[in-house]
Image (cartoon, rainbow, N blue to C red):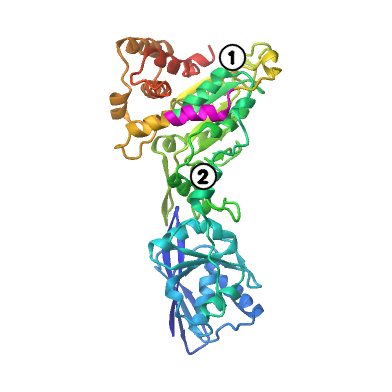
Amino acid sequence: MLIKVFGAAVQGIDATLITIEVNSSRGCMFYLVGLPDSAVKESHQRIISALQVNGYKMPTSNLVINMAPADIRKEGSAYDLPLAIGLLGANETISAEKFPRYLLMGELSLDGSIQPIKGALPIAIKAREDGFEGLIIPQQNAREAAVVNQLKVYGVSNIKEVIEFFNDERELEPTIVNTREEFYAQQSNFEFDFADVKGQENVKRALEVAAAGGHNIIMVGAPGSGKSMMAKRLPSILPPLSLGESLETTKIHSVAGKLNRNSSLITQRPFQSPHHTISQSAMVGGGSFPQPGEISLAHNGILFLDELPEFSKNVLEVLRQPLEDRRITISRVKSSVDYPASFTLVASMNPCPCGYYNHPTKACVCSPGQVQKYLNKISGPLLDRIDIQIEIIPVPFDKISDQRRGESSASIRERVIKARQIQEKRYTGCSGIYCNAQMNSKLLSLYARPDDKGLALLKNAMERLNLSARAYDRILKVARTIADLEESEQILPSHLAEAISYRNLDRENWAG
């Protein structure tokens, strides 16, 4: 007897339909074909135990299981549930009548309980695309998958529930999530607020410009000057995620298995802060079975690199291409996957090994050679890709002891959202461009042309600071954002002057 059950394989951040064909005939052999990996092959033992504990017998006939299409590698233990149901269907222990209407995924424990899986959201999206009536997955993943509308999502905790459902002995309750209500309810709940920051008005302004235009930023300052504290507050002034961005971000975290159990959509922009000992593969993604890296987990959000020179040079250099292309392609001999990586890079560093170069009150004990060697850990090409470079001076005591609260994140965020709305309107017809940081040369010449006075100012700064052509583009992009914050159509010399002041840490000027 030939039975077909349906599952899904996750590749990149999308899922592919897998048809599990089970053929039962006379004999006593068991064959599993269709490019399964070791974890899928081991499912045989888990299925035998799960069925026995729950009072069902493993079929003893000649069984051939094919996982089609056979050219896609099937990885992991999430195929246990559809394999077990297919075997019981071929043995006529359960009715196969409802099999074509449902997609199943789940890992089995030896007692028949069903363990959570990775990638439940892309699997649910695929189930809806292919016209399935429902999706049966582990209870812990049900809320994550239930954000997909027009699909019945059933969360189950034991294989017995699934068997009884197909035999019409039990009704399963679909999980219902009010996606929009949950999404909008959590958007403005932030742990950190700029109102708690004392002083540092120039740095707050730089971060506001970075948030308004999606610009990369580096903060250089002595230990304890507030670099990490300011970076952690940046998400509170970023524009809220749209529903589409939220879905894409949730898909990436779902595939990586980073979503909290029983959670649904990610409602706030991600803030990824990897340790400086991170490897290249962990940063950009990869492994023998490619997984998203930190830059993809930071998609639509912030990648914060604290103590930038402490990161391996190779790790920093692999960031150059994703910063430009906003995508990363992981290529292996057997497969190639694309992950989105549109993030804002926020970096912080000390100005020298001891941390007190240019400090107003503490003396630096580093030689000029040591300072230069420390700064040389960050290559020119990477520095060029950082639009805003700001120096942080430690806050004096009278500012620290001031009890008055600063401007709140909510009011800064309002200005940022206004500026972003201007940019969205401006780039309506431009595919893949949503903010000033993403402008190409053609758009720069259209929307970021300074007047003659501004050009003279820019020429003088370029020659004095010995800036590259890419730095010229960066200054124009930042100036365009400053103009948008002031709701100005034209880029004025004052906007350019502020943008140039954010390049004051370029290499020729750092150790001087």
Q: Residue 407, which numbered label?
A: none
State the residue in front, 482 or 370. 482
The secondary structure type at the circle numbered 1 is helix
Name the spot of residue 253 as percent of width and height, x first: 52, 49
In the picture of the structure, the residue carrying the numbered disc 1 is 368
Looking at this rendering, what residue extends furthest in the bottom direction? 26
Q: Residues within 10 Å of mark 1 (few under 14, many from 20)?
A: few
3D distance between C-alphas at marks 1 and 2: 52 Å
State the residue in front, 118 or 288. 118
Front disc: 1 or 2: 2
In the picture of the structure, the residue carrying the numbered disc 2 is 184
Q: Is residue 13 left or right of residue 258?
A: left
Q: Are marks 1 and 2 in contact (CB under 8 Å)?
A: no
Please tell me which residue is depicted at 66% across the width and 73% down the height of the picture: 111
Identify residue type, mark 1.
Pro
Does 181 appear above or below 504? below
> Is any part of residue 465 visible from this angle?
yes
> Is any part of residue 293 visible from this angle?
no
Residue 126 covered by magenta stretch: no
Identify residue type, mark 2.
Tyr
Name the spot of residue 403 as percent of width and height, x first: 69, 20
Name the spot of residue 46 as percent of width and height, x first: 61, 72
Residue 408 covered by magenta stretch: yes
Instruction: Identify the image quadrant of residue 225.
Output: top right
Span of residues in magenta: 407-418
Q: Is residue 244 left or right of residue 115?
A: left
